[in-house]
Amino acid sequence: MGRRIAKWAAIALAAVLALIVAFLVWLNTDPGRRFVVNQINAFETLSGLKVHVGRIEGSVFSRLRLVGLSLADPHGTFFRAPEAALDYRPFGYFRNHIDIRNLEIAEARLSRLPQLRPGDPNAPITVIEYGDYQ
């Protein structure tokens, strides 16, 4: 009986690992990159910073190009860049840090300084869902 349980536990673990690997592979496809873009575009911090990306080209796990990048605060868009080349390591997030190796923006427009909501500058970045902040 114990071997049978161990066998099914191993099969279940292998199935879960296969699903995780399949999801990670899928993220580097066009539909996966669109999913990531949707997640980025839904991002808003408690300070009111919003990030918008039109399209992602390249690998979502290392080097990519963000096309149509803009940043907004509660008063609207304050920064636009037609494209930005980014070299980063997203798995650093699991170690509680953002690992950006290189960010190149050849052309950008800062229309005004951001006017973010006040808060503790040393607090961790907190993401809220739209409509959660009053």
Image (tube, rainbow, N blue to C red):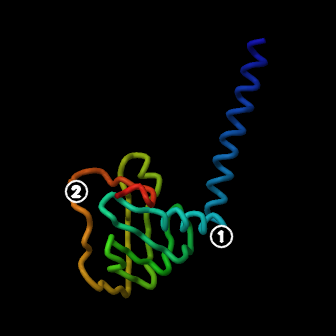
Which element is circle 2 on?
loop
Q: Nearer the viewer, mark 2 or mark 1?
A: 2
**Residue located at (32% from left, 80% from top):** 78
Residue 75 falls in which quadrant of the image?
bottom left
**Residue located at (42% from left, 70% from top):** 51
Residue designated by label 2: 119
Residue 86 percent location from the top left of the image: 43, 71
Residue designated by label 1: 30
Few, some or many C-alpha atoms within 10 Å of disc 1 (few <14, some 14-19, many ≥20)? some
Q: Is residue 75 left or right of residue 20?
A: left
Task: Give the Cα distance between marks 2 and 1.
Answer: 37 Å
- The mark nearer the N terminus, 2 or 1, is 1
Residue 81 percent location from the top left of the image: 40, 83
Amino acid beneath label 1: Asp
Instruction: Identify the residue at the far front of this view.
Output: 134
Q: Is residue 37 above or below residue 3?
A: below
Residue 98 percent location from the top left of the image: 37, 57
Q: Which quadrant does the C terminus fall into?
A: bottom left
